[in-house]
Image: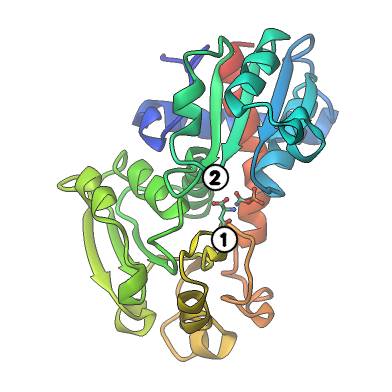
């Protein structure tokens, strides 16, 4: 059996099929152990640094909880309270954090490939917690873990990924991780201006089936999963374009009830109006459960990367 011990996790392509099934099984095991024992001791004596240069609720907190549940320690770097404010560079900051010998560093940054650019000045394994528009590999990990838990498989799945596919990073990573499964179909659903980037399609070419469409209605009857994403307001170059596109796709209970039931509705969150709250109580609305699953599968990932 392989392992991710000591490895950087920068891209969803860093997980092979065997890694994924091993992590799913480990996440299930840890879920049981955490539920009966609360705090485990696998990571006792190990330290994780979270270095987030961009806002986060789920990724940062679920990694911190995962490490706490594994019995390890967490040190949180807070940019707004750091010497970045005195003009220190981010590269020097990473060098300093690494100098205290953490066992793993989770990094998020608004600049694509920031974790890649510092991996050689940092000795600790780096886990990419989101780098600009590029990727969010551990989000993809929890997404496929959630699909696997729901259907008992990911092979053969038909998924519609809806929303801002141009500036979003969850759609690329989810697409990449889905290449590890067989017979997957992806429908990219977006207004033309926000369709998925060419570079993403190039990387999945020949490895999954995909189609570009403009509305959910066209393909609702085919989907096993509808994966909704928000407009990435902070990444729009033209605020007026954001205003024009705001509200161009909204999933409501009424709209869902008009079609054949889509078995599963997902969203990486945060949502900012693209799924109305009346959807939350439908049994197929899985986005809050999806966020919870993140903690268990990130605990599994940390356990492997730490080699504990
Ligand atoms: N939280 C996810 C991310 O950081 C999705 C989003 O912010 O829309 O990419
Ligand atoms: N899904 C996700 O990455 O959420 P945060 O941005 O809150 O971490």
Dot 2 surroundings within 10 Å: few (below 14), some, or many (20 or more)?
some
Q: Is 202 positioned to the left or the right of 16 in the image?
A: left
Q: Is residue 77 above or below residue 73?
A: below
Mark 1 CB lies closer than 8 A to ligand 1: no
Picture quadrant where residue 122 is located:
top right
Q: Residue at x 75, y 36 (%)?
A: 85
**Residue 174, position as x, y percentages in the image:** 41, 49
Q: Residue at x 74, y 16 (%)?
A: 47
Nearest the camera: 33 or 133? 133
Give the residue number, with chain letter if any, for mark 2.
110
Picture quadrant where residue 73 is located:
top right
Nearest the camera: 271 or 257? 271
Q: Is residue 258 above or below residue 115?
A: below
- Which numbered circle lies on residue 25? none
How far apart marks 1 and 2 lie (CA) works out to: 10 Å
Q: How many marks can you see?
A: 2
Q: Residue at x 74, y 41 (%)?
A: 61
Please say whether residue 176 is visible from this viewpoint. Answer: yes
**Residue 227, position as x, y percentages in the image:** 47, 64
Q: Residue at x 45, y 25 (%)?
A: 117
Please say whether residue 9 is visible from this viewpoint. Answer: no
* The C terminus - image quarter: top right
Which color scheme does this rendered protein use? rainbow
Dot 1 surroundings within 10 Å: few (below 14), some, or many (20 or more)?
few
| N-terminal-most mark, 1 or 2 | 2
- Tell whether label 2 touches label 1 (CB within 8 Å): yes
Give the residue number, with chain letter if any, for mark 1.
234
User: Ligand 1, what quadrant?
Assistant: bottom right
């Amino acid at each position: 059996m392989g392992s991710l011990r000591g490895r950087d996790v920068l891209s969803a392509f860093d997980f092979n099929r065997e890694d994924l099934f091993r992590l799913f099984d480990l996440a299930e095991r840890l879920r049981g152990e955490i539920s009966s024992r609360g705090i485990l001791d696998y990571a006792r004596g190990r330290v994780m640094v979270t270095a987030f240069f961009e806002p986060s609720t789920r990724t940062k907190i679920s990694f911190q909880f995962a490490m706490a549940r594994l019995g390890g320690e967490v040190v949180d770097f807070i940019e707004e309270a750091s010497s970045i404010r005195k003009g220190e560079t981010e590269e020097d900051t990473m060098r300093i954090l690494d100098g205290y010998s953490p066992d793993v560093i989770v990094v998020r940054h608004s600049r694509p490939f920031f974790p890649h650019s510092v991996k050689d000045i940092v000795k600790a394994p780096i886990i990419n917690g989101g780098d600009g528009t590029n990727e969010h590999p551990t989000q993809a990990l929890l997404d496929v873990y959630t699909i696997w838990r729901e259907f008992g498989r990911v092979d053969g799945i038909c998924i519609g990924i809806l929303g801002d596919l141009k500036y979003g990073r969850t759609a690329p990573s989810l697409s990449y991780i889905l290449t590890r499964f067989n017979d997957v179909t992806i429908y990219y659903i977006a207004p033309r201006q926000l369709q998925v980037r060419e570079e993403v399609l190039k990387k999945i070419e020949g490895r999954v089936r995909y189609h570009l469409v403009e509305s959910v209605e066209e393909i609702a009857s085919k989907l096993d999963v509808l994966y909704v994403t928000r407009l990435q307001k902070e990444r729009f170059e033209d605020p007026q374009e954001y205003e024009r596109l705001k509200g161009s796709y909204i999933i409501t209970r009424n709209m869902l009830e008009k079609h054949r039931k889509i078995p599963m509705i997902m969203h990486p969150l945060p949502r900012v109006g693209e799924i109305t709250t009346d959807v939350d109580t439908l049994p197929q609305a899985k986005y809050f459960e999806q966020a919870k699953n993140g903690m268990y599968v990130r605990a599994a990932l940390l356990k492997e990367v730490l080699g504990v």
